[in-house]
Image (tube, grey):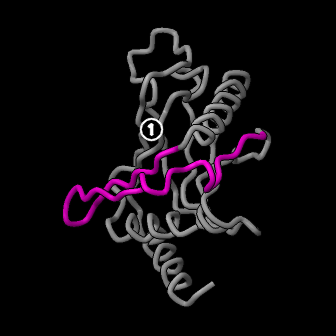
Amino acid sequence: MSDTTADTSGAVSRLLASCCVAFALTACTTACRGNHHGSSQRSGDLTGTITAVLKQTPGARGLHIYDARRMAKATVTSGGIVRSSIRVVPLSRRYATLYVGFNQRGRAHFCRLTRALARRGARLHRHQYFVIAADSRVFFRLWVDYQKFPSGLCGVPGFESDRMPIRAARALAKLIRNR
């Protein structure tokens, strides 16, 4: 790993660890193929709490989105994203939105992952979490609302994280894009 990559990773870790603000994660949608039983929400709305856990995951390079309990077999990796879709949109001088788009394989894996989590959540009557990690560091821990989305989040072209500190969003986008 080069010194600049190590510096970027350290900067992302420090920025996210120092942030105490709760974030909302919203998945953007296209036509949804899942059955949401008349939910008034858009098919891809996903809310949860993002925590800057920054736990090491051995040997995981690039982006990984997986079941926090590691029971669901589906995982979205760097191969499931469209690198050119990664963008940071400033909301103000301090905050920005980070957007990461999925390719066809990434959408399919994300659908399988969230469907498994929604079904397990319905069985256990509690939210089930998935993790978004980049370069062996867990950045986000989010949940799928099994009541609103009992079939998971299918048909979503990607995810966006609102109200991230702008420096953290840019550093994380660079980290994901370069893996």
Membership of 84 in magenta stretch: yes
Residue kind at label 1, given as amino acid type: Ala
Asked whether the viewer can see residue 166, the reply is: yes
Q: Quadrant of residue 73?
A: top right
Q: Is residue 51 above or below residue 171?
A: above
Which residue shows up at 63% across the image and 34% down it? 108
The number of numbered discs placed on residues in the rendered structure image is 1
- Comparing 173 with 104, the one in front is 104
Residue 169: % across, % down: 39, 64
Q: Position of residue 70 (x, y in %)?
A: 77, 46
Vertical placement of residue 64 versus 16, above or below: above
Residue 21 position, x and y percent, is: 38, 58
**What is the residue that sits farthest to the top in this orientation?**
38
Q: Quadrant of the C terminus?
A: bottom right
Q: Position of residue 161 (x, y in %)?
A: 41, 50
Quarter placement of the N terminus? bottom right
Is residue 66 left or right of 165 when viewed as pictured? right
User: What residue do we see at 63% from left, 40% from top?
Assistant: 105
Q: Which residue is mark 1?
A: 27
The dominant secondary structure in magenta is strand
Question: In the figure, is residue 151 to the left or right of 24?
Answer: right
